[in-house]
Image (tube, rainbow, N blue to C red):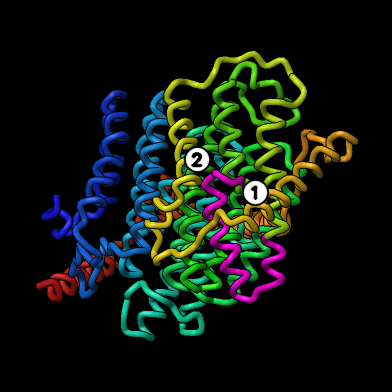
């Protein structure tokens, strides 16, 4: 295996190959075996990589492609991506959708490939492959809303790839290198690359694809999507733009505004999508600080977030499978029918809320400390406020309205055994990493000398959480909490979707009028030509009339001359 690594076998390769095989293999059992074997093979490559270095160097068309760069930053992202692939494969064991099995592997393998890419061209290839393959997880719902959302999702992510390629060409031309390392945002192409990363990271005003597409995907698709696309963008930002000051402020905005949308949202999977946006903000802020503590915080948060966010999406996916929807207004009382799912959901809620002894506590502490030590007072206050908001919308709202609120009479089966197994493993990791946080800290890019379980930190966090819990209880008790009703909440995408819809209709109308005008002109010309041809070739036409022999001889000579000229030049 070590020889294969030194020859350039990236952990992404067995996963992508398994995905391609799954697309053509009709056997359900064989596909599921591929889905379980692929992450195990990738993990074997990861563990057997002998040392930090660049492997898989390919020379092609004058370019040098680095397909497997193994260093402290890519190592941690690669491991959690492999872990996510394995959990997702277990979660999907009951499903028989061949397209979903195949695209899950190809998409997650492409995410792995992008993380281990050592140059911008290799990054671009896998960047676009993630976009093209992941859209099928949205379309797998097979309904008109999912199809339209998938088209919007694909358009936005292909645009991200186009910007990445354009920026990379400009940047490489300027620097003379395609290496994917720290990028100067002020250099030619640097800003385009940042925007490309920002689209995938769901920066403010670029975030709407996430809330639009993820809730419309399948129960399995949402779990898979939550793990890779945005966290790949976080990795790219950490690799290329660590220490960029503006990212601290962008992160502060990202953690704040989703809280308000999540409070009024009725679709619980959409609440999780807004919550995902909120969590990304903590990571972006840590990257913006750019210190070792900040980058460790972003990496640790990404690692644990992939696990506990997948757990929450898994629990809502089980509800979707059994009940048929995840509308808070029509759920409640499900703990009676789905007690294990409810229990696992509570563990995910505790982890995302950063309760002590859960993984979110030991990861988020690094980021908050980095922002505080960096002297960013206002962003720090916003991040603390958002931490309370996380408890409200993900820690309380999700499990409360799904499982414990007013009983709507749903009596359904518990989730399938494989779903429960995947949720159980994710729950174990949420607690294990919260208690044995040294195992997490040892994976981080830089040495960690930090103790999360100090008296001040524990008391401060518990005060914050208890205050948020009291506020939620007070608002619900006195009926001041926004009612859970069926509704459509407008986000900032309304503006460009409205404008885009108007522009599309105008272009369609103008094109229709233009084609009608062209059609009329061609129709008139066609009628004139057909009339002349009829007059020439019809039984009563000119060619059917008697032709004087002198005129016939002249035309015969002309045609013969043309034939001789053509024959001369052809010879």
Pick the quarter of the image with the C terminus.
Answer: bottom left
User: Which numbered tag is attached to residue 274?
Assistant: 1
Residue 520 or 258: which is nearer the viewer?
258
Note whether 156 is above or below 21 in the view shown.
Answer: below
Q: Earlier in the sequence, mark 1 or mark 2?
A: 1
Note whether 208 is above or below 419 in the view shown.
Answer: below
In the image, taking residue 1 as reference, residue 462 lies left or right, namely right
On the image, the x and y values in percent for residue 222 come to 52, 39
Residue 342 quadrant:
top right
Secondary structure that dominates the magenta span: helix
Which of discs 1 and 2 lies nearer the camera? The answer is 2
Residue 36 quadrant:
top left
The residue identified by callout 2 is 431
- The secondary structure type at the circle numbered 2 is helix
In the image, taking residue 80 as reference, residue 347 lies left or right, namely right
- Residue located at (59% from left, 36% from top): 144
On the image, the x and y values in percent for residue 242 come to 48, 73
Part of the protein shown in magenta: 355-383
Q: Residue 360: within the magenta? A: yes
- The secondary structure type at the circle numbered 1 is helix
């Amino acid at each position: 295996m070590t020889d294969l690594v030194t020859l350039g076998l990236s952990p992404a390769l067995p996963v992508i190959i398994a995905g391609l095989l799954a697309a053509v293999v009709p056997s359900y059992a064989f596909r599921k075996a591929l889905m379980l074997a692929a992450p195990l093979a990738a993990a074997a490559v990861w563990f057997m990589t002998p040392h930090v270095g660049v492997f898989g160097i390919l020379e092609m068309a004058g370019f040098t492609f680095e397909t497997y760069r193994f260093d402290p930053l890519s190592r941690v992202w690669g491991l959690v991506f492999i872990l996510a692939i394995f959990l997702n494969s277990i979660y999907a064991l009951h499903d028989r959708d061949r397209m979903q099995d195949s695209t899950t592997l190809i998409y997650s393998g492409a995410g792995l490939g992008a993380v281990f890419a050592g140059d911008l061209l290799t990054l671009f290839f896998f960047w676009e492959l993630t976009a093209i393959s992941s859209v099928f997880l949205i379309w797998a719902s097979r309904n008109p809303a999912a199809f339209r959302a998938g088209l919007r999702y694909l358009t936005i992510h292909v645009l991200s790839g186009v910007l990445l390629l354009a920026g990379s060409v400009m940047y490489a031309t300027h620097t003379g290198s395609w290496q994917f390392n720290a990028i100067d945002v002020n250099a030619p192409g640097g800003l385009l690359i940042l925007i490309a990363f920002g689209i995938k990271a769901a920066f403010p005003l670029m975030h709407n694809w996430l809330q639009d597409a993820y809730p419309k995907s399948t129960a399995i698709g949402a779990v898979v999507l939550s793990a890779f696309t945005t966290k790949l963008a976080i990795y790219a930002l950490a690799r290329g733009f660590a220490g960029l000051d503006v990212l601290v402020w962008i992160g502060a905005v990202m953690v704040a505004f989703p809280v308000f949308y999540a409070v009024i949202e009725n679709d619980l999977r959409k609440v999780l999508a807004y919550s995902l946006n909120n969590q990304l903000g903590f990571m972006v802020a840590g990257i913006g600080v750019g210190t070792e503590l900040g980058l460790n915080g972003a990496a640790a948060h990404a690692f644990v977030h992939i696990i506990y966010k997948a757990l929450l999406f898994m629990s809502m996916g089980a509800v979707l499978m059994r009940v048929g929807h995840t509308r808070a207004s029509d759920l409640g009382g499900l703990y009676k029918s789905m007690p294990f799912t409810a229990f696992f959901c509570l563990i995910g809620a505790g982890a995302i809320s950063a309760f002590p002894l859960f993984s979110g506590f030991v990861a988020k502490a690094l980021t908050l400390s980095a922002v505080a030590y960096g002297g960013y007072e206002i962003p720090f206050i916003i991040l603390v406020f958002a931490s309370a908001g996380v408890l409200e919308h993900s820690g309380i709202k999700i499990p409360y309205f799904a499982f414990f609120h007013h009983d709507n009479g749903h009596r359904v089966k518990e989730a399938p055994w494989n779903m429960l197994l995947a949720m159980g493993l994710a729950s174990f990791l949420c607690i294990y990493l919260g208690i044995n946080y040294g195992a997490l800290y040892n994976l981080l890019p830089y040495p960690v000398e930090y103790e999360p379980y100090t008296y001040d930190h524990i008391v401060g966090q518990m005060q914050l959480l208890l205050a948020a819990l009291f506020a939620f209880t007070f608002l619900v008790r006195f009926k001041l909490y926004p009612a859970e009703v069926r509704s459509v909440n407008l986000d900032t995408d309304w503006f460009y979707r409205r404008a885009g819809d108007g522009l599309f209709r105008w272009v369609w109308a103008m094109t229709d009028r233009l084609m009608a005008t062209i059609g009329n002109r061609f129709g008139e010309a066609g009628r004139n030509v057909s009339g002349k041809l009829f007059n020439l070739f019809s039984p009563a036409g000119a060619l059917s009339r008697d032709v004087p022999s002198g005129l016939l001889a002249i035309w015969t000579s002309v045609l013969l001359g043309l034939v001789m000229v053509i024959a001369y030049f052809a010879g």
